[in-house]
Image (tube, helix red, strand yellow):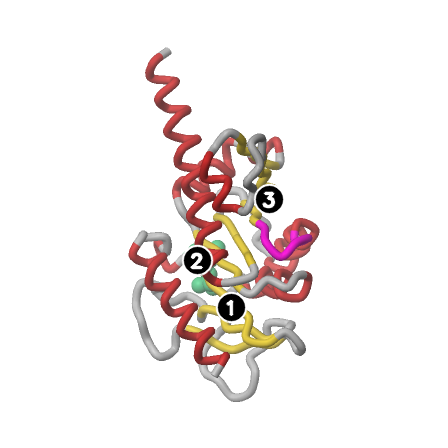
């Protein structure tokens, strides 16, 4: 029952993010926990057009990202990042998308290794309700070797909610529930778009 509920949640998120055009060129991958002990999760199959809905959109994997039992399909090439999230935290959902805004922000702020946001109402969507709340997103290099990328990603996975930008690649966001993970992803993309729009408006004024 829980498995089917989680499957349906992930299918619905995939459809919503596809409607936003957040899966260009088959990019992106999504994962949802189906078991805590042992760690098991559903993850998108690799290389598929995530805008399409098919019976083979997700595979079920274990704590190391290996297929559980007899299944056709290949887990996302970036499953190891979701492995880090589900093994290191109690997060229930982990979402990875490539957008122009998250790529441009990651390049603009990549040398400083992070970007910090403050003074924005939408930070409340990330669970920070204080007046002077700040949110920092780390930016890691885009290692082509996925175990190396996962090793660079892992030290930033320290809480049940979080986000990491991968330079000129995309963002991975995780949270306790699928609803929260999607909400956080939307809030981060809002902050990225706001920052880029503000910078170009200021440039055109001066
Ligand atoms: C086509 S973009 C390169 C791979 C990638 O970064 C990605 O997010 C999609 O890979 P997957 O194996 O999950 O389809
Ligand atoms: Zn990717």
Indicate which disc residue 156 carries. none
Q: Residue under label 1, please give it.
A: 32
The answer to whether mark 3 and mark 2 are in CB contact below 8 A is no
Q: Residue under label 3, please give it.
A: 141
**Which tag is nearer the camera, tag 2 or tag 1?**
1
Question: Around disc 1, counting alpha carbons within 10 Å, would you say few (fewer than 14), some (14 to 19), or many (20 or more)?
Answer: many
Dominant SS in magenta: loop
Report if the beta carbon of the residue with label 2 is closer than 8 angstroms to ligand 1: yes
Q: Nearer the viewer, residue 206 or 147?
A: 206
Report if the beta carbon of the residue with label 3 is closer than 8 angstroms to ligand 2: no
Measured as percent of width and height from the top left, residue 164 is found at 57, 47
Q: Quadrant of the C terminus?
A: top left
For the view shown, which residue lies furthest in the bottom direction?
Answer: 70
Report how far apart the C-alphas of labels 3 and 2 lie in the structure: 17 Å
Q: Report the label total.
A: 3
Q: Which residues are magenta?
A: 157-162
Magenta region includes residue 161: yes
Position of residue 60 relative to residue 131, above or below, is below
Indicate which disc residue 28 carries. 2
Position of residue 119 relative to residue 171, above or below, is above
Q: Earlier in the sequence, mark 3 or mark 1?
A: 1
Report how far apart the C-alphas of labels 3 and 1 lie in the structure: 25 Å
Report how far apart the C-alphas of labels 2 and 1 lie in the structure: 14 Å
Secondary-structure class at tag 2: loop
Magenta region includes residue 174: no
For image coordinates 55% across by 57% down, the residue present is 175
Question: Around disc 3, counting alpha carbons within 10 Å, would you say few (fewer than 14), some (14 to 19), or many (20 or more)?
Answer: some
On screen, residue 108 versus residue 152, left or right, reads left
Position of residue 22 relative to residue 121, above or below, is below
Report if the beta carbon of the residue with label 1 is closer than 8 angstroms to ligand 1: no
């Amino acid at each position: 029952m829980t498995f089917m509920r989680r499957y349906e949640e992930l299918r619905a998120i995939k459809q919503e993010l596809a409607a936003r055009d957040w899966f260009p060129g088959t990019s992106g991958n999504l994962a949802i926990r189906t078991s805590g002990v042992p760690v098991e999760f559903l993850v998108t199959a690799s290389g598929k057009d995530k805008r399409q809905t098919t019976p083979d959109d997700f595979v079920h994997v274990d704590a190391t990202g290996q297929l559980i039992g007899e299944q056709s399909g290949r887990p996302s090439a970036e499953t190891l990042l979701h492995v880090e999230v589900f093994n290191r935290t109690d997060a229930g959902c982990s979402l990875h998308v490539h957008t122009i805004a998250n790529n441009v922000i990651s390049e603009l702020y990549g040398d400083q290794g992070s970007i910090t946001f403050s003074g924005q109402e939408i930070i409340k969507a990330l669970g920070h309700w204080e007046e002077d709340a700040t949110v920092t997103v780390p930016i890691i290099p885009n290692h082509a070797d996925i175990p190396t990328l996962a090793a660079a990603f892992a030290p930033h996975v320290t809480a049940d909610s979080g986000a990491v930008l991968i330079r000129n690649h995309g963002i991975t966001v995780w949270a306790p529930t699928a609803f929260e993970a999607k909400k956080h992803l939307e809030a981060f993309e809002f902050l990225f778009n706001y920052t880029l729009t503000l910078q170009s408006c200021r440039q055109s004024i001066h």
